[in-house]
Structures are given as C-alpha cells and as structure tokens.
Amino acid sequence: MKFTSRLKKISLLSSIISIIIIVIIVGSFIFQISHADFVRELETIKESYYNEQKKLIQNEVSKAYDYIDYQKSKTEDRLKTEIQDRVNEAHSVATNIYNNNLDKTDVELERMIINALSAIRFNDGNGYYFIGGLDGKMILFPVKPELENQDLLEVQDSNGNFVIKDMITLVNTHGEGFYEYYWAKPSNQLDNNKKISFIKYFEPLNVFIGSGLYIADLEQIVKKEVMDMIADMRYENDGYFFLTTYDGQALVFAQEEYIGKDVSHIKDVNGISIHNEEIKVIDAHGEGYIEYMWEKPNVDGFYPKITFVKGITDWEWVLGTGVYVDDIEETIENKKLMRKKEIESSIIFIAIVISLSGFGVVFVQLFLLRKAEQAIKAEERLYEILTNLSEDGIFILEPNGKVIESNIKGVQMLTGGKENFIQLNFKDMITEIFPEDKICEISKETHLRTNDDNLMPVEIHIKSIELDRANKYIAYLRDLTSRKLYEETLKEMAITDELTHVYNRRFIIDQLQSEIDRVQRLSDPFTIVMVDLDKFKMVNDTYGHVFGDEVLKVLTMIFKDHLRKIDFVGRYGGEEFIIILPGTNKESACKTIQRIKEIFKCYQWVHQDLMITFSAGAVEINRSNCNEDVMTYINQADQLLYKAKQNGRDRIEC
C-alpha cells in the first residue's frame, strides 16, 4: 500500500513538473516564433499596404471607366430611340389632322400638316422635321426652305450617297426605317458630320415624314452626363475621381475653382508636373500609377500620394483617383499592439490548456482505461443496430472506390446478396460524378447502376473519414425511385386537363406567352386558334353529360392525331379549346384546322344520325403585332370565333 501511495505521489509530482516544463518550453517557443514572424511581417506590411491601396484605386478607376465606356456604347441607341419616337409623334399629328379634316383637299391637308410641324424644334434646337414626296421633292425642309419643292433626287452626301433617292427606296421597301449619311450642320455648312435619320411613310398624302440627329450633338450630352456622374462618385468614404482633357483642362476636379481651367502647369513641392506625368503614363501604357507629394484637405503640410490614371482615347480624357499612403505608420503601430496581445493571449491559453489537460489525465486515466473497453463494445453494437435499421445504404470505401463494409440496406441496393459484395467497386456503380477516376467528397442526386444493369435514381452523400489511421470514405445512398415517380405524376397533373388529357388552361396561357416572347426574339410567327363546339349545350341536354364528355375526348383525340408534335392543344374552358401552331402563318393554320374540322364532322357517333361540328377563330402573331399581352390575342381569336358562330357555325374565321 505504501509503495502504491508513494508511486501515486511520484506520478502526481512528475506530472506537475512536466506540465510546468512544457508550459515554459511552449511559451518560449511561441514567443520566439511570434516575434520572428512579426519582424518579418513589419518588413512586408508597408509593401502590402501600398499594393492594397494601388489595387483599390486601380479597381475604382476601372469601374468608373467601364461606366463611361457603357454610356459611350449606348449613344447611338439613344439617338435612334429619340428620333424614332419624334417621327412617330409627328406621324400621329399628321394622322389626326388628316382624320379630323376629311372634307379638305389634299393640298389643304398638306399645308395644315406642314404648318403644324415646321416650327417644332428639339434637342437644343438641333432637331427638326422634314417631309418629302416620293417624287424626290421636299415639301418641308425648315433649315433650307430654299430647297422646298425642288427635285433633290440627285443630291449626294460627302460619301457619294444619293440621300433622298435612298430614303424613297427605304420607304417603298419597308415603310419606315433608319438611314445614315453625312450632312452639314445648319450652324456649320463647311464640315459634314455623321447623321442618323428615321423616316416613315404617310400613306394618305403619299409622302414620308422624317427627322434626324447628329451623333456629335448627342455625344456632347452624354459627356455632360458622364462628368456629372463622375463628380458625384465616391468610394471608401472620402475617395473621389478627377477628369481632365489631354491638353490639361479640368473637367471634374476636387478644387472646384480649377474646373474649366488649365491645370497642366500645376506641380507638387518637388517640382513634378503632375499632368505631364499622367500623359506620359497614358502614352506609354494607356494607364498607370504616378507618385507625388500633395496637401491633404483640411490638414497642414504635404503628404505622399499615389494616383492611378487611365486614358479615354477617343474623347482624349484622363480619368484618375488617388490615395494618401502616410497612414501606414499608424497601421504599423496598431499591428504591434495587436501582436503583443496575441502573444500574451496565446501563452496564457496554452498554459491553461496544458495544465488542465495534464491534471485531467492524472485523475481520469485509470478510470478511462477501465471504461474504454466496455464503451467500445457498446458503441459497436449500437452502431450495428442503427445502421441496419436505416432505410439508406451506408458504405465504407477505400479511396479507389472498393467497398469495405456496408449495412444490410446497402447490400440489397448494390447486389441483393452478400456473396459478391467484396468484389464491388463503388465508382463503377455510380454514374458520371467522380473526376480523375477517384472517390471524392460530394453531395448530390445521381443514378446507381444496379446488379440487373438498371439505373436507380439516388441521393448520395460522401465524406472523408480517418479509420485505423488511414484515409477512408463513408457514403450514404438513398433510393429516390418513389419520390421521382411521384414528382413526375404531380408535374403531369399540374399541366393536364383531367377529362381530355390535353393541356389545361394555365399551361396553354403560359405557353402562349412563351411563343409571344419567341416572336419578339426571333421574329418567327405563329398562329393561335380558338375552337368551340357548335350547339354543345343541346348535345348535353339531349344525350347527357356522359356522352358530352365523350365528344370532348374524341375531339382532342383527333387534334392529337392530326396536329404536329410541336403544336399545343389546351382546354380553355367547357367546350372551348386553344391551339397554338408555332412557325405557322394564319393561312396554313386555317387549312390545318379546316382539315381537322371536316374529319371531326364526319365522325360516326353511337347516335348514327348525329353530326357535331365546331367553329373557330384564328389569329396570326408576328413581328408586326407581337407587343400585346396574352389576353389581347385570346380575345381577338374569341371575337373571330364569335363571328364564325354568327355567320352560321361550322366555319373558321381567319
């Protein structure tokens, strides 16, 4: 007993001494390592700070440049939209004048329209309307009235294009459209500038109405908008941008008194000409950094500053922003304080952890040894019970995919029996998910190739584990067959009419919207047909609703048999059906429905003397009329259907 007691005391004392020694050694090691790391960090922290700041201003300038580039790219689109809208407005004015004065002669109407449009100006007075006849004579030309009623068919722009003749060809071919040419501005007759005009045919007077704008005029507006936006841009609280021209005029500047003035002469305290350095960088590389000394806002003295600039070549602008880099000293001091606290906290934490761990080991070691074997056996038994109760297949795998172990469900999923189990390789049975022919951590839905070579939908989760000091994988497989079947059933029910097994109202309306979107993208026309059985209420009242349901089923069966696979048939309500025929114009669609109508009309019913017919209305949707909503087209088809009913039924109105 004494020996045992002495042994316990020696063991306890040895543990305490060991803990103290370990704490001292680990603490010293941590201090030395942390101090050495900090010394190295101080050497690189300034460089990292510079790089971070340089990256920041480069990214901000790039974002601002991308904004400017985007606005430039939209200039021509904006111009086209504006002049098209203006011409459409003028065309509407002319149409209203004509419709409200039908008692007037064409000459009187022409004069009224000219009077209404001649004085209108827009786009800072640069925009105006012109009217030309298809004989080449301009009847309205406000900026050059001396050319009115003159034959201008042979007038050419600076590139040799016959402007009026080309416009007449455009009107005759398309009715309206854009035309690009080079034309002198009213304010400068010597220089020709690119101009885009939109012209539109006005049929009542056999003339075209047009208007045009110069690209350069709208570009000035875009530049002003860009300068206003750049002036308002901020980042990192106080970060701002500047804009100058290549010759040194300030467009956007922190000191507002410099805006509009020449800043190319400004130098820093060391005599560096800042603008000249910016131009050198842009000439050499298109963008880059310059460094100089500059005063801070609201702070005395001059401080080191780094600026990133980028050239906007076609506008001859310099875009840039900069940051002061003297804040690094404050950052270094903060780093020192933080590192000191980290070292102290680490030593204290390690000392506490080692002490608690050491004393814990001394007091619980024997107890844990006695309980370890019992716990291991109990856990193994519990693990076996739980895994075999699971409805999921659970597998232990080698990294190459070989199956080491599995629960009962896993054996059933892979082989159906235990005899061939150990020859299996997991990656050969799971399709298309393992790169480089190795097992990896994944979580997804895929397919399992079963023993009878069928594919079973499964949900698979694979995690890496350490087992007996070796890298293994644990995999969980869940059979999704029932769930997938249920999902497919629900999906089919959601879009199908229960009685006729064609598409239901909701789906056919959604599909109609999809076809409208397709026309808007690709200009590929299609036709919608509204079908309604004639005197169907009388059929139901005479022969009963069961027979009426059979009539609806027969009709949809005939539709399916005689329409293309790409066509859509949906029950809109009661005895009404909607048919969508993609890529089909109205004439072809009506021929198809007429053929189906005759087949249905000749169908032999149980009641031999009975003949049932239907009426239909068809509407074609193409590029010229594709901007209405779904219900507009349905109503149009319905109105034509109603017309067919009024005209005697058993007919199609197209």
Image: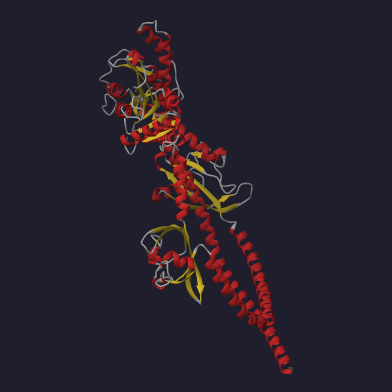
Residue drawn at (57%, 74%) of the image = 381
Residue drawn at (31%, 24%) of the image = 174
Q: Quadrant of residue 548?
A: top left
Residue drawn at (60%, 72%) of the image = 34
Residue drawn at (49%, 34%) of the image = 224
In screen coordinates, is 46 left or right of 144? right
The vertical placement of 515 against 155, above or below, is below
Instruction: Mark yes or no: residue 474 visible.
Output: no
> Which x, y percent locates residue 400?
41, 70
> Which x, y percent locates residue 365?
66, 82
Q: Quadrant of the C terminus?
A: top left
Q: Quadrant of residue 120?
A: top left
Colouring convention used in this rendered image of the protein: secondary structure
Instruction: Mark yes or no: residue 596 visible.
Output: yes
Query: Viewer-proximal residue, 520 or 597?
Result: 597
> Which x, y percent locates residue 526?
35, 31
Query: Viewer-proximal residue, 212 or 349?
Result: 349
The vertical placement of 312 against 366, above or below, is above
Please count the marks in the image. Answer: 0
The vertical placement of 281 against 554, above or below, is below
> Which x, y percent locates residue 409?
48, 65
Q: Quadrant of the N terminus?
A: bottom right
